[in-house]
Structures are given as C-alpha cells and as structure tokens.
Amino acid sequence: MAQQTILETRGLTKQFKGFVAVKDVNLRFEAGKIHALIGPNGAGKTTFFNLLTKFLIPTSGQIIYKGKDITQVSPAQIACAGVIRSFQISAVFPHLTVLENVRIGLQRKAGIASRFWQSSKVLDGFNGHAMEMLKTVDLEAYVDTKAADMPYGRKRALEIAATLAMDPELMLLDEPTQGMGQEDVDRVKELIKRVGANRTILMVEHNMKVVSDISDTITVLQRGQVLAHGNYKEVSTNPQVIEAYLGGGHA
C-alpha cells in the first residue's frame, strides 16, 4: 500500500542576489516516517528548512502540505496547521521552570498563549498534561528547575517536549544533537525515535550515527540540489555522495 505524502516540494528554489541556495528541489515526505536531510556544509539544508517554515520566501516553486499549497502562507499559519520547528540553538525560556516552558506550549495549543493574566487555577489546569510531556522526554525530575540551570542536552529535550506540547503532525528538527556529548546524543536519539512513532519528523543532522540508526529515508543535498535519496544503505554507498563528502567535509 502506498504511503501517504504529508509534505511535498515542487521545483523549490531560493536565490540570493545571484547565488542559488536551493535549486529546483522536488521531494516527497511520507507521513509517519523519520526523514533526515544531510549534506556538506553550505549544501542548503537550513535554507530549505527556512523555506518550509516560511522564514524565507521561495524565489519559485511550491510547497504542498497535506494536499494544500502553503507556499504563500505565513509562519504562524504554518504552525497552526501542525508544522512545528526547532532550531540549532536551543530556544527555551531560560528563566521559567521546565514545567512552565512546556505549559506555554500547551497554552499556545489551547489559544491562550499570550494571556499572561490568566489565573493560576487556569494555568495549573495544564500541569497534568505538561507532566505527561515531561515523562515522554525523561524530564520529570527537572519539573521545578529553571531552564537556564539545566545541562545543554536536557535543554534540547525540553525544547522537544515544548514542541510536542503543540501536538505537531510534522516536526522539523534542526541539528537536534549539535554540541552534545555522547551520552546526551544517545538520549536525544532515542527520544526522537520514540516521539517519531506516531508523527512525521524531518531533521537536519550532522551525526551520521544518529542518521543511520533512526532515519527511514535520507536526502542528500549538495549546492542546493538533491544529490541522492533513499535508505541509509543506498545513500551511503552512492559514489556521488562519497565524493561530495570527501570533497566537502563531513555533514
């Protein structure tokens, strides 16, 4: 049975004053899969992410999400549609507790994220669900810890929990293991695998061990174009991919 396509790009292109960062990319992402986007530095991976989440406007091409053209919609509309993104730099509220960070995600989903005058009784109503999110990412022991006081790897897990709180159908993770020690890498890798069991994940990732262990499909970009696409065995033995990595550094 054919897999359902949740996201598709058609001829997606981004040009900056004569420099083409993403060129004529045609990709389909299957629902319920973990899809890794890799490539040498400067290959266009982050630009591609920025196009998908509308932080950049395409020069040409289309972005189709669940059968609808979302090329011209705003980043806020993208988020409301169920496409939620994390960033290379951990983006949590440093002076709020772990519980409060996740609760904000739940408030956003409920449509009261900006209503800071809500009573403590109303806000406490989110605590049970927030604790479920924290258990999912093994952070229940940090519930009262300020985010600024957490180890880096646990901050990344918190960011994923806050993302999960918004109940995304498609999660875009930008370098989820960047800057981590091996213990944190293993923990976040297993976390991504676990939360990807019932949603679609698209991740940009440099750690090839992580990519090989949890990705269903891998796309390799080089100079803004698709160089290869397939499972890890197909991609890792592709002569063009091997040449690109030897000539362009590790991704």
Image (spheres, rainbow, N blue to C red):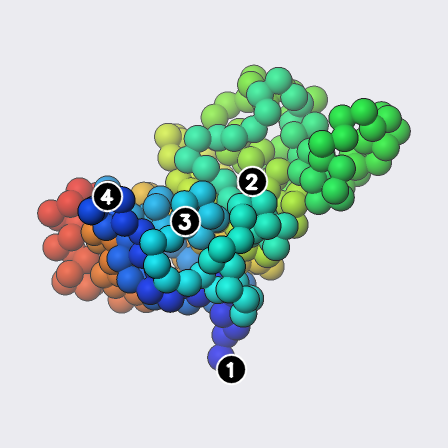
Label 2 – label 4 distance at C-alpha: 35 Å
Left or right for 82, reference 70: right
Identify residue for label 2. 160
Q: Is residue 239 above or below residue 19?
A: below
Q: Earlier in the sequence, mark 2 or mark 1?
A: 1
Identify residue for label 3. 57
Are there few (<14), some (14-19), or many (20+) residues within 10 Å of tag 3?
some
Q: Nearer the viewer, mark 2 or mark 4?
A: 4
Mark 1 residue element: loop
Mark 4 residue element: loop
Identify residue for label 4. 17
Q: Earlier in the sequence, mark 4 or mark 3?
A: 4
Check whether the beta carbons of the residues at disc 1 and disc 4 lie within 8 A of each other.
no
Q: Nearer the viewer, mark 1 or mark 4?
A: 4
Mark 3: amino acid? Ile
Mark 1: amino acid? Met
Are there few (<14), some (14-19), or many (20+) residues within 10 Å of tag 4?
few
Mark 2: amino acid? Ile
Left or right for 34, reference 14: right
Q: Is 102 or 107 nearer to us in this picture?
A: 107
Q: Residue at x 58, y 45 (%)?
A: 76
Label 2 – label 1 distance at C-alpha: 31 Å
Q: Is residue 162 at least partly visible in the picture?
A: yes
Check whether the beta carbons of the residues at disc 4 and disc 3 lie within 8 A of each other.
no
Mark 2 residue element: helix
- Which mark is on residue 1? 1
Check whether the beta carbons of the residues at disc 2 and disc 1 lie within 8 A of each other.
no
Q: Is residue 177 at least partly visible in the picture?
A: no
